[in-house]
Image (cartoon, grey):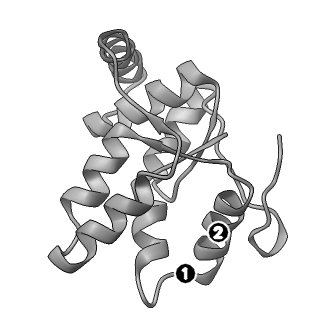
Amino acid sequence: MVAVDSTVWIEALRRQGDVQVKLGLEGLLEHYQAQLLAPVRLEVLGGARVEERWRLSAHFACLPFRRVTDDDWERAVSLAWRLREQGLSVPWLDVLIAALALHDQVRLYTLDAHFGRIAEVTGLRLYQPGHAGLFAPD
């Protein structure tokens, strides 16, 4: 399973979005490997245009969905402290997304450089699609 960050969803949904990102997401969806995290749902649907909301909501309803628990929030706080001790200042939702992916031991498909820095400190595994966007198993 690969958690897909909002940066990928947003880029893939843009008309003029990066074709490689679109193919990478398509590869995950075709192999039933794309996971939707609760904070990503908020970021994407919260910023969606009125005419896109229903369609996106229906699409997201078909994906494996990862809710956020009280324990997840505690893990995110611990991760935020760890990152700050390393001199990293990361947006809070990114910390939460990283904490979820780390706990669940899933890779994260993202275009956000913050996650690269988080990976250096934590071992967060980032997903890179295979050739022509094909799904790249572990």
Q: Separation of disc 1 and disc 2 at Cα?
A: 12 Å
Residue 18 is situated, as x and y percent measured from the top left of the image, at 55, 81
Q: Amino acid at mark 1?
A: Asp
Give the number of marks: 2
Asked which quadrant contains residue 37, the reply is: top left
1, 122: nearer the viewer:
1
20, 71: nearer the viewer:
71
Using residue 17 as the reference point, say whether residue 45 is left or right of it: left
Using residue 8 as the reference point, say whether residue 71 is left or right of it: left
- In the rendered view, would you say 54 is above or below 61? below
Which residue sits furthest bottom?
16
Q: Amino acid at mark 2?
A: Glu
The N terminus: image quadrant: top right
Classed neighbour count for the residue bearing mark 2: other residues with Cα under 10 Å, few (<14), some (14–19), many (≥20)? some
Using residue 16 as the reference point, say whether residue 90 is left or right of it: left
Residue 75 is situated, as x and y percent measured from the top left of the image, at 39, 13
- In the rendered view, would you say 60 is above or below 64? below
Question: Element at badge 1?
Answer: loop
85, 118: nearer the viewer:
118
120, 27: nearer the viewer:
27
Residue in the picture at 41% in, 15% down: 82
Residue 132 is situated, as x and y percent measured from the top left of the image, at 79, 76
Q: Earlier in the sequence, mark 1 or mark 2?
A: 1
Q: Tell me the mark number nearer the camera, choosing from 1 and 2.
A: 2
Mark 1, residue position: 18
Residue in the picture at 26% in, 48% down: 42
Mark 2, residue position: 26
Question: Element at badge 2?
Answer: helix
Using residue 57 as the reference point, say whether residue 106 is left or right of it: right
Residue 135 is situated, as x and y percent measured from the top left of the image, at 78, 58
- In the rendered view, would you say 119 is above or below 135? above
